[in-house]
Image: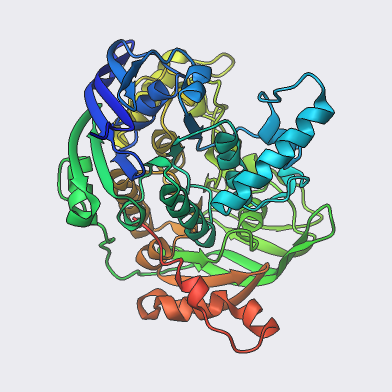
Amino acid sequence: MSYPAIELRGINKSFGAVHANKDINFSVMPGTIHGIVGENGAGKSTLMSILYGFYQADSGTISIDGETLHIGNSQDAIAAGIGMVHQHFMLVETFTVLENVMLGAEGHSLLGSANRTARKALKEIEDKYGLQVDPDAVVGELPVGVQQRVEILKALYRGARILILDEPTGVLTPQETDQLFDILRTLKEQGVTIILITHKLREIISVTDTVSVMRQGEMVAERTTSDTTVNDLAELMVGRKVLLRVEKQQAKPEGVRLRVNDVSWIDERGVRRLKDLNFELRAGEILGVAGVSGNGQSELLEVLSGVILPQKGSFTVVSKSNQEVFSADRDRDAAVMRKLSIGHIPEDRLKQGLVKTMPASESAILGFHHDEIYGEKLFDLTAIDKATQDMMEHYDVRPRDPSLKSANFSGGNQQKLIVAREMLRQPELLLVGQPTRGVDIGAIEFIHSNLVAARDKGAAVLLVSTELDEIMSLSDRIIVMVDGAITGEVIASEADERQLGILMANAADERSAEGTSSDVLAQGGSV
């Protein structure tokens, strides 16, 4: 008889009044890929943190290969053959790949000897699992997809037979996601048991054997993946039918809100990240910016939000009461842009959107903290808490506790708090970067409907996303960026994936003859 690789029985965990896990029963068979899905705050990451020893369950048991174990910390988990790859990587960026893999598991008092042993072991793991990485490369200089590969190598180097991946594709390009799934299939063939936590249901359908669904701290369903569908899983997650496509009326664009003229930007290494960009954005429309991550979209948002200056060209912001031109010789900052009724939902919520150590009430007013409603000389804490509570109610941020540290909210609820902060003031120009990255299906539907509602109320919305489904569903017009330049513009209702794929592959096609856009078309977005 084959025991489950993992078996959890009667797991309960509470944080104060929040019952994060409620009598969870859960098992995974050896050598399979098992998905866990659920809305943000459903308890998925808490459950896996208990399995990995970060948290202690209030009650319940954990069995590995049929043996009941006490996992008091991550060292106990590692000793039991469990490895975890976190959503936000645990790597030292200034260290090499080999140094990161060895860190904390040197195994020898003499570093030189430990280095040689680790290098040999790493080579054997790379060959066995097809995870080739230059051991002497500096981690901070590697693409995100390769950094994630290093995290997997770290776990395997420590003897992991069970691998937990928490939202592993949230920061990956579609191509990197495909590469990751190829790696996971190879690991499965070699007998590794994998638990995949993700909100992207098409990924679950693509790569898992079985899937469990959590809702509000409870395990509500388990399915054989081949016997279920995206729609079924979405309904189980949310507890109701979910609209997977955006419903919207045809746009009625009005006056120009943003005009970009020959904008270029060069980074500190002399690389030209933006190349003579020209476009207009009107009130009452959504202009989507499509492209593979790293092609200048981030820099465009930073220029327009006042974080950096264009070294060439200018852009004009036209509000209902004013018109301002910004160029290299014009002082600017984010506060100036906000006075022009510009809202900004940044691409990276942790670096630019909130402060993890602050309570939610303080993150909820960042950028607006000088407003009179929050106090003239001293903060009016009652007013701040009331405003935060209203944001949480309107945008379904869970738990509804303004005093809870921002870091203690799930990624999707952090995102909803930022979206609420920026959108409830009804900005005339809304800059949006990757609005649903790391967000569950229910929150995606909610955020999408609010972006369309902002458009219908007259906002001009600039949407940057690497998800083609999102771009095509929300946008009225689409521009495509490749290598810092705009390679084309299309009407969204007339666009298809092939057409966008050709535009996204434009630079590569020019360098390598005819070619096809098949690699790019693999990006077709995910739910």
Q: Residue at x 45, y 23 (%)?
A: 80
User: Toward which corner of the image does residue 401 lie, by quadrant?
Assistant: top left
Q: Residue at x 39, y 30 (%)?
A: 45
Front residue of this view, candidates 343 and 360: 360
Front residue of this view, candidates 265 and 366: 265
> Would you say residue 433 is visible in this rendering?
yes
Q: Residue at x 45, y 48 (%)?
A: 190
Vertical placement of residue 275 versus 85, above or below: below
Vertical placement of residue 467 versus 347, above or below: below
The reply, left or right, for residue 200 in relation to residue 74 is left
Q: Quadrant of the N terminus?
A: top left
Give how far across and how far down residue 76 sits, in percent: 48, 17
Give how far across and how far down residue 483 sits, in percent: 67, 69
The residue furthest bottom is: 514
Give how far across and how far down residue 251 sits, in percent: 35, 69
The reply, left or right, for residue 372 in relation to residue 242 is right
Vertical placement of residue 73 versus 438, above or below: above
